[in-house]
Image: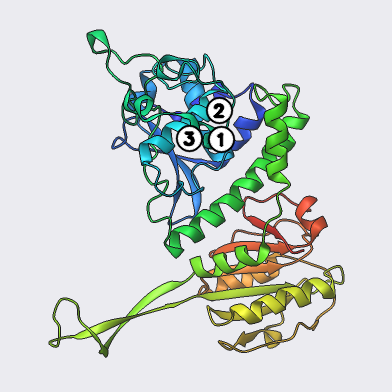
Amino acid sequence: MSFDLKLHAYRLLMDEPFFACLSRKIEKREDRSIPTAGVRVCPDSAQFEMLYNPDFLASLPEEHIKGVLKHEFYHLIFEHVTSRKPEGVPHKTWNIAADLAINSHLVGELPEMACMPGVGPFENLPKLKSAEWYLKNITDDQVDQCGGEGSGEPGEGGEPQPGTGQLDDHSGWDEDSQSPAQEAANQMAKERLKQAMKEAAGEASKSPNGWGSIGGELKKDIMKKLETKVDWKKVLRYFIKTSQRASKSSTVRRINKRYAYIHPGKKVKRQAKIAIAIDQSGSVSDEMLEKFFGELNKLSKLAAFTVIPFDTKVNEKLVYEWGKGKRHKAERVMCGGTCFDAPTDYINKRGDFDGVIILTDMEAPAPKACRAQRMWMTDERGASRPYFQTRERVIKID
């Protein structure tokens, strides 16, 4: 019988409301090509996912499975996955520093081989410091005494020595970190995680178990991260760029790298078709409309926009195509209530959009599912107290 991590996560985290909620937001996938487990940003979906070797987890007692889950989620909370490794620092050294910072919060919850401040080669190091602090204070000799990812340094009898192992797989953390595609995926994943952490903090605050094993200082650090201001303009640009599709065409103006001067080269064109649904209700302020349109004017070279004004319906006569590189002014062309199913039905019926952006105050019931990826742009009230809960991105315009 296959090891079902989702089932174990649900049961083992019942007394950890914050981690339980966060766990529900993270996709989990079997991968026997890695020795243990690991988290990464999926470049295709721009979401965090946890990969795990079912044989490794099945070999652990339940308290250690729980510890491994929390270890992976701490990597997300501390932004180790999306923060660039400091330039010139070896991959292994940065991984160990990150693990030391996390494992300080998991004393007694992990396999004995996991590297830990105060144990084995790190016995001189204090607990509860940041990854950056450990990076400055660990020595090359201490790093050399540790095994690779998912293993410890063998001792007598071949068993890993305590405190000498890297518990999980960190591959992919800094691969292609300079590429625009990975940067975009990381930014979107961070925004989604922040939304998930807000929901998790809300659940923890209401639960009889409170924040579970998360201490007061760490809780303050998490809440401080949630208060960090998000650059909505960057998120908007990333959303549009990650929606782009590539098309290739032959051109004699480029040299074919394989058959130079025999066959024409290839020209790659990236373009996205984005639906811009504009809530026409009076509670959507003119100021928010103007800010939003001002940014779209700057981004119109990246995508083909179709503007869809709506209230409780969509009047197709008012829908218009925004010419590439053209400028438009924000204007109100309808007046009424709000029904998100109206633009969703129109968009799904057309079926030719790569992404959907809805500008709204979020004051209406939840809509149907959308065939294209969808993002919501709203004001302070809409972001903090929406009429409905959604796993889709909700971005505040400020």
What residue would you read off at disc 1? 23
- Give the SS element for disc 1: helix
What residue would you read off at disc 2? 10
Q: Position of residue 183 (x, y in %)?
A: 48, 59
Question: Left or right: where does residue 268 sit relative to residue 258?
Answer: right
Camera-near label (2 vs 3) is 3
Residue at 76% over, 82% down: 330
- N-terminal of the two: label 2 or label 1? 2
- N-terminal of the two: label 2 or label 3? 2
Residue at 77% over, 30% down: 206
Label 3–label 1 contact, CB within 8 A: no
Whether residue 224 is situated above or below residue 151 in the rendered picture: below
Question: Left or right: where does residue 247 sit relative to residue 307?
Answer: left
- Give the SS element for disc 3: helix
- N-terminal of the two: label 3 or label 1? 1
Residue 336 seen in this snapshot = no
Label 2–label 3 contact, CB within 8 A: no
The disc labelled 2 sits on which kind of residue?
Answer: Tyr
Q: Nearer the viewer, residue 152 or 94?
A: 94
Whether residue 270 is situated above or below residue 74 in the rendered picture: below
**Alpha carbon separation for disc pair 2 and 3:** 34 Å
What residue would you read off at disc 3? 135
Q: Position of residue 99 (x, y in %)?
A: 47, 30
